[in-house]
Amino acid sequence: MAVSRGITYGQGMSIEPGTEVLVRTADGQLLPRRAVTDIVRGEDFPVVWVTREEEWNAAQAEGREPDAVPWPADDVRPAGVEAATA
C-alpha cells in the first residue's frame, strides 16, 4: 500500500501531477478533478493543488501550467479508490 502523510491508497496508487482525483467538499460532495501537484506543504496543512478537467486539457494543449487551487490532502484521493486514514 502507498502511504503519504497519513493517507493510505491501494497498491500502486499515489497522487502525482495528472492523476484523476476526487475531492471532498465541505458539505461532503465528491467532485472530479485533476491533480496538478503531489501532496505538498500548505500554509497550515498538507494540500494537493487541483484543477478542473477542462482547465487541465486546455493548459496541456496551450503548453502552460493550469490554473489550480489548493485542496486539503485529507480530502483528496485518486479516482476510484476508497481512502482510509493510517
Image: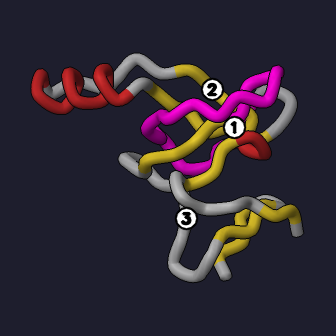
Q: Residue at position x 58%, y 82% from top?
A: 11
**Which of marks 3 and 2 precedes in the sequence?**
3
Assess disc 1: are there few (<14), some (14-19) or many (≥20) residues with their C-alpha within 10 Å of its C-alpha. many
User: Disc 3 residue type?
Assistant: Ser
Numbered label attached to residue 9 = none
* Residue at image point 86% right, 62% down: 85
- Crowding at dot 2, Cα within 10 Å, few <14 / some 14-19 / many 20+, comes out as some
Above or below for 28 versus 73: above
Sequence-wise first label, 2 or 1: 1
What amino acid is labelled 1 in the image? Answer: Val
Q: What residue type is labelled 2?
A: Pro
Q: Earlier in the sequence, mark 3 or mark 1?
A: 3
Is residue 17 within the magenta segment?
no
**Residue 66 left/right relative to 68:** left
Apparent side of residue 22 relative to residue 35 in the rendered image (left or right): right
User: In which image quadrant can residue 46 be found?
Assistant: top right
How many numbered marks are there? Answer: 3
Q: How crowded is mark 3: few (under 14 residues within 10 Å), some or many (20 or more)?
A: some
Determine which residue is flagged by label 3.
14
Q: Which of 27 and 66 is in front in this view?
A: 27
Q: Verify whether residue 41 appears in magenta.
A: yes
Residue carrying label 1: 47
Per the image, label 2 sits on a secondary structure element best described as strand
Closest to the camera, between mark 3 and mark 1, is 3
Marks 2 and 3, how far apart at CA: 17 Å
> Given contact means CB atoms under 8 Å apart, are the residues at marks 2 and 1 in contact?
yes
Give above or below for 77 relative to 63. Answer: below
- The N terminus - image quarter: bottom right
> Could you tell me residue 51's position as x and y percent?
45, 26
- Which stretch did the figure color magenta? 24-42
